[in-house]
Image (cartoon, helix red, strand yellow):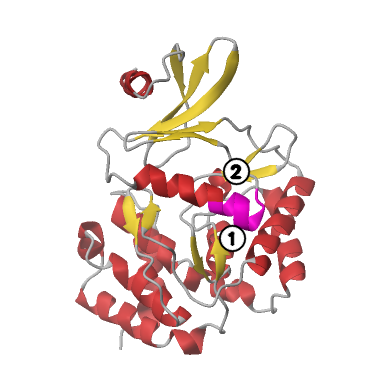
């Protein structure tokens, strides 16, 4: 009740006075969200935070949705309103369960995104947000340097990460970063969703895959692939990986790289939540060979 009252009040303050109620929705890990009900009109999706992390958070998210749609030809919700306090979008539907064809279509669309937006530098026009934490996007020519500084080491000063990783762990992560050129093949930068896991895959009214909650940047395509591979996904999503690998010409060893690239998301989970779903243990196991 408190969440829906918060969202309803902010919608009315923003001028959307035809909204009569807000139905809570589940699934988000950072923001509070709901479906705004309007008599005689389609419902709208609305999200906010009880305490707003920064003035530009929702503007950056709206920008990311537009970039995926305009530069990558992906389906995303329409942005109805983006203010300091809330983001209002057209409502999407749930993705179909058990439908391999849906995931095959998503593989084609994500492959097109990654192969059609190759860029000569890593980064983005400005910093944006991963949940309620700032994602650093300063332009960098070197992909290994960008991934090390902006996606891995960037999390070390965060309070929960400092508590979870001791001095030896931190030094091991730094050594791993120094050896990234030995561990990962060179890849160009391309436009990435940045937070691509199954919860952020929905569907349009005609059944086309649609993506939400981006943290866009130009970086390695395998950042998106690793997040979807390493996070929970339904069995039918296996078709995505087979098709994506074929379309993009992935080498046979791509699966072995996924946990290393997923380090970014593991560090983010530790930073964001007291319960990290085993992420700290995964980090320590992955960096163990670099402790000495």
Q: Which residue is mark 2?
A: 76
Residue 206 or residue 116, whichever sits in front = 116
Task: Identify the element where label 2 is drawn.
Answer: loop
Residue 42 lies left or right of residue 154; in this view the side is right
User: Residue 54, relative to residue 22: is it above or below?
Assistant: below
Locate the C terminus and report the quarter of the image it occupies: bottom left
Residue 239 position, x and y percent, is 74, 56
Residue 22 position, x and y percent, is 44, 18
Which numbered circle lies on residue 229?
1
Residue 106 position, x and y percent, is 70, 52
Residue under the point 48% across and 66% down: 262
Which numbered circle lies on residue 90?
none
Residue 290 found in image quarter: bottom left
Residue 74 or residue 32, whichever sits in front = 74
User: Is the residue marked by circle 2 packed among few (<14), some (14-19), or many (20+) residues within 10 Å?
Assistant: many
Residue 291 found in image quarter: bottom left
Visible residue check, residue 238: no
User: Residue 137, relative to residue 43: is it above or below?
Assistant: below
Residue under the point 58% across and 48% down: 198
Visible residue check, residue 107: yes
Residue under the point 33% across and 18% down: 5
Task: Identify the element where label 1 is drawn.
Answer: helix
- Write the start and end of the magenta stretch as one range: 67-74
């Amino acid at each position: 009740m408190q969440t829906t009252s918060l969202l309803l009040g902010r919608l009315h303050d923003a001028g959307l006075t035809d909204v009569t109620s807000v139905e809570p929705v589940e699934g988000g890990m950072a923001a509070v969200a709901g479906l705004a009900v309007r008599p005689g009109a389609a419902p709208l999706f609305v999200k906010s935070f009880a305490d707003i992390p920064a003035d530009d958070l929702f503007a950056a998210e709206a920008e990311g949705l537009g970039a995926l749609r305009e530069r990558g030809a992906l389906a995303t919700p329409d942005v109805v309103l983006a203010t300091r306090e809330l983001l209002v979008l057209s409502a999407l539907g749930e993705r179909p369960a058990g439908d391999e064809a849906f995931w095959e279509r998503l593989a084609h669309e994500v492959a097109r995104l990654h192969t059609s937006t190759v860029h000569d530098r890593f980064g983005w026009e400005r910093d944006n947000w991963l949940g309620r934490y700032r994602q650093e996007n300063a332009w960098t020519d070197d992909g290994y340097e960008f991934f090390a500084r902006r996606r891995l080491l960037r999390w070390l000063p965060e309070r929960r990460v400092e508590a979870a990783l001791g001095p030896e762990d931190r030094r091991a992560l730094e050594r791993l970063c120094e050896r990234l050129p030995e561990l990962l093949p060179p890849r160009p930068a391309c436009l990435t969703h940045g937070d691509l896991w199954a919860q952020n895959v929905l569907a349009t009214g005609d059944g086309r895959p649609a993506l939400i909650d981006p943290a866009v940047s130009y970086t390695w395509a395998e950042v998106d692939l690793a997040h979807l591979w390493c996070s929970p996904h339904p069995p039918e999503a296996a078709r995505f990986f087979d098709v994506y690998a074929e379309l993009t010409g992935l080498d046979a060893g791509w699966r072995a790289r996924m946990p290393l690239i997923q380090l970014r998301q593991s560090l983010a989970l530790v930073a964001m939540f007291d319960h990290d779903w085993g992420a700290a243990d995964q980090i320590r196991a992955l960096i163990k060979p670099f402790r000495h």
